[in-house]
Image (spheres, rainbow, N blue to C red):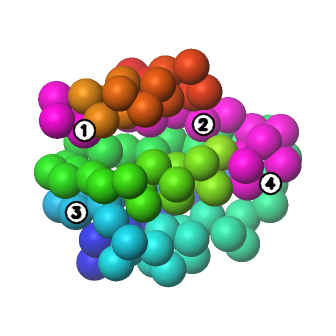
Amino acid sequence: MTVSSRLSSDNKQMVISINERFDFSSHQQFRDAYNNERLKGLTYILDLSKTEYMDSSALGMILLLKDHVHLYSGDLIISKPSATVRKILEIAQFQRLMTIE
C-alpha cells in the first residue's frame, strides 16, 4: 500500500505516510486516509520521508488536505521530505502555505 494513516492514541495527531510515488494513482487512497476524520484541532502530519517521486497532481492533493484540515481548525505539517520532494514543494512555494520540517 502506498498510503497509510494512523491516529495517535491521544487523538491529537493524524500521521499520513506516502511510500515511493505520490501521484494521481494514489488519489483515492490519499483521500480515504483523512476524509472521514472530523476531530477539531487535530494536527495532520504528512510524512514524505519515504516518498521518492511526486508530481503536480500530488500538489493538488496536498491542497485538498489543507482545505480539510482548516475546515476542522487543525494544523498541517509536511514532515521529512526528501531533497527532490522538498525542491518541488519549494518551487510551488508550499512553505508559504504550511509548515515543512
Q: Mark 4, mark 1: which one is toward the viewer?
A: 1
For the residues marked 3 and 1, what is the alpha-carbon distance in whole angstroms? 11 Å
- The residue to which callout 3 is attached is 21
The residue that appears at 80% across and 54% down in the rendered structure is 39
CA–CA distance between discs 2 and 4? 14 Å
Query: Of helix, strand and loop, which one carries label 2?
Result: strand
Question: Badge 2 is on which residue?
Answer: 76
Q: Could you tell me residue 20's position as x and y percent?
A: 18, 60
What residue span does the magenta drawing correspond to?
67-85
- Judged left or right of residue 62, residue 34 is right
Which residue carries the number 1 mark?
A: 85
Report the number of numbered marks.
4
Mark found first going from the N terminus, 3 or 1:
3
Residue position marked by numbered label 4 in the rendering: 39
Earlier along the polypeptide chain: callout 4 or callout 1? 4
Looking at the picture, does residue 45 appear above or below residue 57? above
Residue 32: image x %, image y %? 57, 76
Q: Which mark is residue 99?
A: none
Q: Quadrant of residue 73?
A: top right
**Quadrant location of the C terminus?**
top left
Which residue does the image show at 59% across and 48% down from the upper left? 63
Q: Are marks 4 and 1 in contact (CB under 8 Å)?
A: no
Distance between mark 4 and mark 1 Cα atoms = 29 Å
- Residue 37 shown left or right of residue 62 in the figure: right
